[in-house]
Amino acid sequence: MIYSILNICSNSFALVILTPLHQYQKLIDSGALRGDDHQTRIIQKLQDLHDQLVSYEPPQIPESPNSNSLVWHFPFSRKGKLKAYYLV
């Protein structure tokens, strides 16, 4: 994440998370970029992803299966080919 420290008054500071949309607007305001409808739609998609990730809570990882092996796998497919390997 990108952070910015703002000096609120002489002795206090605030830490602000700069979002993709905020950063884009800053670049437009500074003249580094020109506003563009297509870019704005793309930045809004990044902003939506950013918002989802900020509040994301990963799921609990289940206990590993009771096995002495370091490698276990899902059952074989109908054709007899292994579907996946997992390291535990």
Image (tube, rainbow, N blue to C red):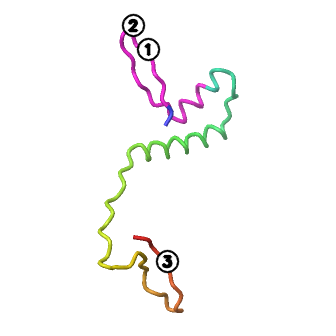
Label 2, on which residue? 10
**Tag 1, which secondary structure?**
strand
Q: Quadrant of residue 62?
A: bottom left
Indicate the position of residue 76 as horizontal and vertical percent values: 47, 87
For this view, does 48 lie left or right of residue 14?
A: right
Label 1, on which residue? 7
Relative to 10, is 34 above or below? below
Q: Earlier in the sequence, mark 3 or mark 2?
A: 2
**Tag 2, which secondary structure?**
loop
Check contact, mark 1 vs mark 2: CB within 8 A: yes
Q: Residue at x 50, y 81 (%)?
A: 83
For this view, does 66 lie left or right of residue 13?
A: left
Amino acid carrying mark 3 in the image: Ala
Label 3, on which residue? 84
| Magenta stretch, residue numbers | 3-26
Q: Quadrant of residue 29?
A: top right
Between 2 and 55, the one nearer to me in the picture? 2
